[in-house]
Image (cartoon, rainbow, N blue to C red):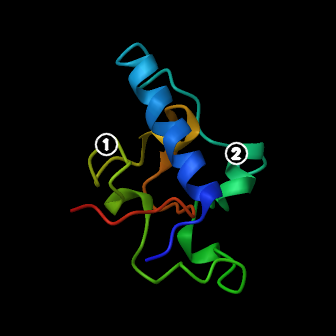
Amino acid sequence: MKTSRRTFLMTSVGVASTFALGSRVAFADAPKVDENDPTAQALGYKADASKVDKAKYAKYAAGQDCGNCQFYQGKPTDAFAPCPMFSSKQVATKGWCSAYVKKA
């Protein structure tokens, strides 16, 4: 799998911010990601994975969603949970972005 420089840098920033924030951001207090947020637009985030532009994001495949991504910091049964790609803002379990990596 090829990773673009942009994806690598965005992932690195997200992971670094997670370490910097640690557990200071309370799950319930974290805001939800807005699809119009610049980071969300850069990563193609959609709160509903079925609305992903498959022509623009060829990496997307049915069945991929935030709930089964390695970056999702909640349980798959949670409606929303923090994600380091968005500075620990909450993403929808059924959402998707181009930083998606299947949970091992």
Res. 56 visible in picture: yes
For mark 1, give the secondary structure: loop
Neighbor class of circle 1 (other Cα within 10 Å; few <14, some 14-19, many 20+) is some
Residue 55 percent across, percent down from the top left: 71, 86
Q: Amino acid at mark 1?
A: Gly
Answer with the quarter of the image where residue 18 lies.
Answer: top left
- Residue situated in front as seen by the camera: 6 or 30: 6
**Residue shown at 52%/26% (left/top)?**
30
Quadrant position of the N terminus in the picture: bottom left
Residue 16 percent across, percent down from the top left: 46, 30
* Circle 1 residue: 74
**Mark number, residue 11:** none
Q: Is residue 25 left or right of residue 89?
A: left
Residue 40 percent across, percent down from the top left: 68, 50
Mark nearest the camera among 2 and 1 is 2
**Residue shown at 74%/54% (left/top)?**
41
Q: Is residue 68 left or right of residue 24?
A: left
Is 68 placed above or below 33 here?
A: below
Is 29 placed above or below 10 here?
A: above
* Circle 2 residue: 39
Neighbor class of circle 2 (other Cα within 10 Å; few <14, some 14-19, many 20+) is some
